[in-house]
Amino acid sequence: MKLRKGLIFIMVILIGLVLAACSDKESSGKDKDSSSKDENAVNETGMPIVDEELDLTFFANKPAQNEGNDWNDILIWNEYQDQTNINVKWNQISPDALEEKRNLALGGGDLPDAFFLSQVTNTDLLRYGGQKVFLPLNDLIEKHAPNLTALMENDPSIRKAITFPDGNIYSMPSLIEEDFLSLRLSARPWINEDWLKELDMDIPETTGEFYEYLKAVKELDPVGGGKTIPYGGTQIQEMVQWLSGSFGVMNHGPSNTNFDLDPNDDSKLRFYAATDEYRQMLEYIHKLYDEDLIDQSIFTIEWGQFLANASENLYGSMIFYDPIELFGEEIGSQYNSLAALEGPEGHKDYNKLSSSVWDTANLVITSENPNPAATVRWMDHFYSEEGAELYYMGVEGETFEKKDGKAVYMDHILNPEGDMTFEQAIAKQLTWLGSINGIIKADYFQGGESAPQSMDAAEKIAPFVPDEIWPRFTFTDEENKILQSIGQDVNNYVEEMRDKFITGDEDLAGWDKYVKTLDQIGLEQVVEVYQDAFDRYKEAN
């Protein structure tokens, strides 16, 4: 239990990250890769990657969970150095200084050989790629990254997500295994099954049945004294995204804010936050909020208060992470998972799902790198089964062992001596806490998302997941300027009015005024930008 409780909070922090917006340097075609003069010294397959030792300097984000360890002398990187013959000197940067020091490195010319898990934005990838500070990797990936290439062939959205409007790829991404649905779902809906039984009700399958359950919970008040909360959560957006599939919006996932595919024309995007379907969803959620079926503090509640409420068993339903792992067996086992609810027009999809592309910029190679080909091979290993096992589990016999063919952490990791926590035991030898490198697979992650309750929930939700979840689109420099100004104004206004419509601070009778205001802000320009980006996305190979 100690293992999973810690891990689930780590993954929650990760889930909060958002793929950055992008900009563009116009180009008439793909740039040629700046292949290293030492490319011939790279072994095409197997280990070591190079026969003569190669020294590289990496600028790396060091998450808070890794505090106290030195990546220059730690099991995972010592082992990989021995395998590859590549000695990485790690320049570890704390998260609070990451952006400043990254910008100084880029602006001051004191470049590392590569940026690793450094949250380089799509805007900077294109800007510095156009300036030849970051190397285009198209040919290098084709020649020296068979594992990433195979993943892109299996899931074309990966290549689309990392290919910029100039046709170039400037980074190697962090990925979630496509079938690791439980992790891609992030927080998911739960319902108090003990209270369902007390009410002699079945698990809701429609929005109408969910409303009737919440209403019955409020009337029953199983906690007593009016303290029962029919639905609670840490933010209203979780409910909005969950219910989007019940009302026919956000039909390709949440990565491209407020945009989905026009159901009447698959060549066009739709700004769904101005549609009748979206308004109908807000009317439904407002009804729940207006009747006190949603926690009235959901717009301001802190995590600590939410967890305290849950520990007192106040919630009839919620959207959150694994209840048993977070609330304990006694309370958590009362909850069963919900899947998609059928809405009033017959929509029944589960669209609240992240792309398998976690971050576009896992590794970015600079013009200072003495051997880009070897560096690409170094990174590509982590897209393989063996590489994923190494990064997330460590070394067999040192940090994990095989039981019934499955890798499991050894006892000194699972149950460290004294006051040491599981996280501290992991951080002494591995560096994955707080970051996803290469590809994360269910077989090598033992946190809350792979707990039985969460995996069962994912299996229940799987039939309602769309066939294609979009990653965030990439944009040209001019497009990005529009998105950073008018686009941000549009998004801010949509979010502000969403909350006001739900609480009743603004009457939905004023919907036409809301739509007109969006037009006045400049929605048409934003739609044009996204449509152009979508057209490129479809055409990308």
Image (cartoon, rainbow, N blue to C red):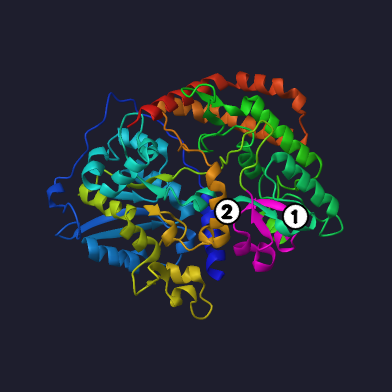
Residue 478 is inside the magenta segment: no
Residue drawn at (60%, 22%), measured in percent from left and top?
Answer: 521
Amino acid type shown at disc 1: Leu
According to the picture, the residue beneath numbered tag 2 turns out to be: 457
Q: Residues within 10 Å of mark 2 (few under 14, many from 20)?
A: many
The residue furthest left is 40
Instruction: State the image coordinates of residue 343 (x, y, percent, origin top left).
Output: 67, 36
* 535 vs 150: above or below: above
Q: Which dot marks residue 196?
A: 1
Instruction: State the image coordinates of residue 366 (x, y, percent, origin top left).
Output: 28, 44
Residue 337 is inside the magenta segment: yes
Instruction: State the image coordinates of residue 119 (x, y, percent, origin top left).
Output: 42, 47
Which sits in the foreground, 197 or 483? 197
Residue drawn at (77%, 24%), measured in percent from left and top?
Answer: 509
Q: Residues within 10 Å of mark 1 (few under 14, many from 20)?
A: some
Quarter of the picture containing the N terminus is: bottom right
Look at the numbered disc 2 and give the secondary structure of its residue.
helix
- Magenta residues span 309-338
Which sits in the foreground, 296 or 38? 296
Amino acid type shown at disc 2: Ala
Number of marks in the rendered image: 2
